[in-house]
Image (cartoon, helix red, strand yellow):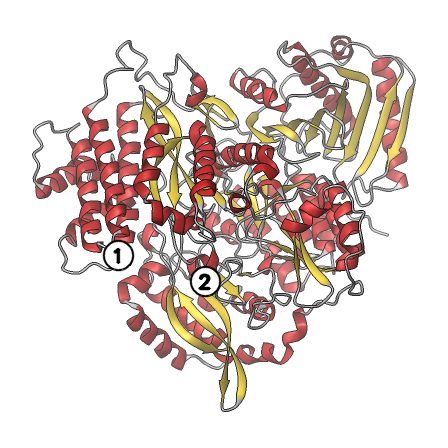
Amino acid sequence: MLSERLQLKLFLEPTVVELEAIIPVFHRFIREQVVNELLIDVIDYSHVPDGPGVVLIGHSADYYVGAMDGKYGLVYSLKRGGPGASMRLEDSLRRLVNVARLLEQESGLKLRFQSGALGLRLTDRLHAPNDDLTFESAKTEVEQLFARVYGAQVAVERVREARGPLALGIRVAGSPSLEALLEKLGGPPAAYAAPSGWH
Amino acid sequence: MTVATTWKQMLAGRVREDWAREIDIYETQLELRKKGKIEEKLFAETRLRRGTYGQRYDNGQRHDGQRTQTLPFPSGELTKGPVTMWDAPGMQRIKIPFGKLSADQLDVLSELAEEYSDQILHVTTRQDIQLHFIHIEDTPDIMRRLAAVGITTREACGNAVRNVTACPYSGVCHTESFDVTPYANAITYFLMGHPDTQDFGRKFKIAFSGCKDEPCGLTNFHDAGAIAKTRVVDGELKRGFEYVVGGGLGAVPYPATLFDEFLPEEELFPVTQAICRVFARLGERDNRARARIKFLVKKLGIEEFKRLVLEERSKLRTDERWLSFLSDLHITDEKPLRAAGSLPAAPYPDGFEAWRKTNVRPQSQQGYSTAKVTLPLGDFTPAQGRALADIARRFTGDSMRATVEQNLMYRWVSDADLPAFYAEVARTGLGAAGADGITDVTSCPGTDTCKLGISSSRGLATELHKQLTVLGDTLAPAAQELHIKCSGCSNSCGQHHVADLGFLGVSRNMNGRRVPHFQLVIGGQYKNNAGAYGLAIGAIPSKHVPKAVKTLTDRFVNERQPTETFQAFVQRIGKKQIRKLVDELSIIPTYEQDPSYYSDWGDPREYTIGDLGVGECAGEVVPLVQVGLAGSEREVFEAQLLLDEGNSQGAAERAFSAMVQAAQALTREKNSFLGEGVDEIVREFRSHYYDTKLFFDPFSGGKFAHYFFRAYEHRGEASVSKDAAHQLIEEAQLFVEAAHQCYTRIAGALP
């Protein structure tokens, strides 16, 4: 994935999401270093309609639980660093699934993710402009990765938003458990490797 | 064809040459700092002048509610300023002169929030846009992309001329003398980078207003304020400005002083330039806390200050730019996109009529209106930004203005389009009514992202917004028009001094734990360009603030006399009544009974930590020092009452007495034999707390102790003006707050 920044989203099963209840969970993730990443703070944007919701700010990536495109879900937003281009999408999926799984395990939240429906936005207009060429390249990469991980048919469509970043809707047949997906992806991710020049 | 691999390549030729060069230089400085070839203080000022600020936790430490953890940033010990880690997320402030935004600019701002920030664009109380959680190494590209659409972040922060603000109604207003937009526009670029504005000891803020009576320009709390005025000279109508200087909020607010009741337009630039030169030459440089121009004006007196400025003015070499802009005052004129019209007949979209009532105002041009989009806490998303840009393209053209109330205003909406315009705004999710009213609470970033925040002003603002919105139309019209403003600390970025109900974040030790509080500030006036500043009545536990707001607004609605303003109502019933309410609300359950009081709004981390007060007697034993500090707070309040009665002398004496009592209470922790004599208290306080720097806080140093020492030096002076007494009360309040903080620190309850 040439895009150095991306946002990968797992949608939630339709339900009433109490965003306020996410806040203490994210704070605990930081306090107990539950996720193997440098996490910094929690910001509540639940007052913004269709906003990112509750944001777990990290150094390399942020996690949002909100309804940014009108549908509730968890977004993994890669900002910098991480593995090289060839592993970027897979690593992002692994981290997303890992945190989704952790949220599902929070009994107080009662969240269930639809593992077969995802969204991808390439938030890097320099390296991944919203054009047909980038779409075709991203589509191929998505299809290959998801077919391998899910072992099922993958449908990728382009989601058009005027002047927005390139956005893709991903549908995969079946709905494997997040645990099973994570296992396929190699289990909970290790800390980011820090190649030279990485910040 | 070469494929662009950097934004610099991609935007080549699309950025003004001088701006491109500045950004290249900044990027080089950034690289040099990474190699350790630029000293960190110098680099800090460099980035601040480009609008790149630090944020909370950028010292690499964060308290997680139980203990302080180190944030292991990858760049290790590399810093971007003193105690500011390189990798720590920061804030990018983006100067938007007088808040004017084009659709293309809004598109790019949205892209930047989407790619580099946390999906939120934030409108500030000075018409800027801020992006948070930005990595410093992304800032050069951010600046290039902004520059490509005509926005520079130059001098958005640092000791420079900050964003020039102006009334958003300029040019379309019924009460203005003339449109101040071209003046605000021209002076922005005249002073930006001007050699006479590069050597200030502190920042300098300018505001323009089209008229004197409305609040829109808020000139009264600016370093320099220009209010449009006309005068007939030799039979000819001349334009000029009522020009004021030395206003400011901050810890101790100063009302601006009249410099010239009619400064001709030809003199606007040279006089402002001369003021900048005098400020650079004579303004305080060592003590940051007293470096704003308000202190210089006060120290010299307005007459001497004016003499020095005019002397400086007479020495200036003529600059053709002083007058050249006057030949093209139409440069900022806006052309409506759509023909003027009349509001079509009903039916209207749901919510339209309520929205129109509060968010729409007829322009001075027949058939057009301004329309405000209410941004919750000034926030909106990139998708909303693009939709709002499209609305401008469809209905108004490039005439949007970010407002000091943290909203977005469209001008030139044809009345015929209002229902369709509203329908489009509502589709973005931002169609709420109530712009600039009680539900539209203004707030600074507070503890969310600001290093100086003490309490969660945004958390409180969100909660107040929620609770007041639920009340909705059941709120009486008089209450709906009130202004609520929240600041997370005494620096007043939320402008709490000029609200009907202002809240200022503080903390208190209660039941052996630290508890977030807000000082209730009453008596501020928003009209007349922020005509009067309120004073703190007392501290309320954060979780009781919504109840305080409800009780106060109910009383106002039920007991007000016809047409009575909130300010007049408070004056009539007396602050004692309000203080009584504060006292009633000051009691909270113990931690064991309800721990939620010991966390802030929107942040479940325990606000207090440490091992103090969890023992079995903690709930019952009140240390003597707390009794003394409570007494000093009471005295500050009594000083206010004396001031309200017109007894300035008595008010000043009582304010000083409050400081003495606080100092005594604190000093007795170190010297239990301390007596009652003022000289002894000052001496011992100095020895135990000032000389040892125990009283210093990480950000303000010894500023608040200086208030006390200065009050001591000037005690008993024969005549005290109302303004001087007001200021002393503010200083006493801050000194008492600092004493609370100091006590908490030495008692070991603070992280």
At label 2, which amino acid type do we have? Answer: Gln
Which residue is located at x 41 percent, y 74 percent?
B261
The quarter holding residue A27 reads top right
Q: Name the foreground residue: A72 vs B437.
A: B437
B66 horizontally vs B358: left or right: left
> Can see residue B143?
no
At label 1, which amino acid type do we have? Answer: Ala
The quarter holding residue A48 reads top right
Q: CA distance from mark 2 to mark 1?
A: 31 Å
Residue B198 numbered mark, or none: 2
> Can see residue B634?
yes
**Where does the image place residue B204, in percent across and percent down from the top left?**
44, 59
B605 horizontally vs B719: left or right: right
Q: Mark 2 or mark 1: which comes first in sequence?
A: 2
Name the element at disc 1.
Answer: helix
Q: Quadrant of the C terminus of chain B?
A: top left
**Where does the image place residue B607, in percent across and percent down from the top left?**
42, 24
The chain under label 1 reads: B
Name the element at disc 2.
Answer: loop
Identify whether B106 is placed above or below A182.
Answer: below
**Where does the image place residue A118, in percent across and percent down from the top left?**
80, 24
Identify whether B98 is placed above or below B441.
Answer: below
**Where does the image place residue B68, in percent across and percent down from the top left?**
43, 23
Which residue is located at x 43 percent, y 28 percent?
B544
Q: Name the foreground residue: B503 vs B201.
A: B503
Q: Which residue is mark 1?
A: B724
Question: Circle 1: is it few (<14), some (14-19), or many (20+) Cα within 10 Å?
Answer: some
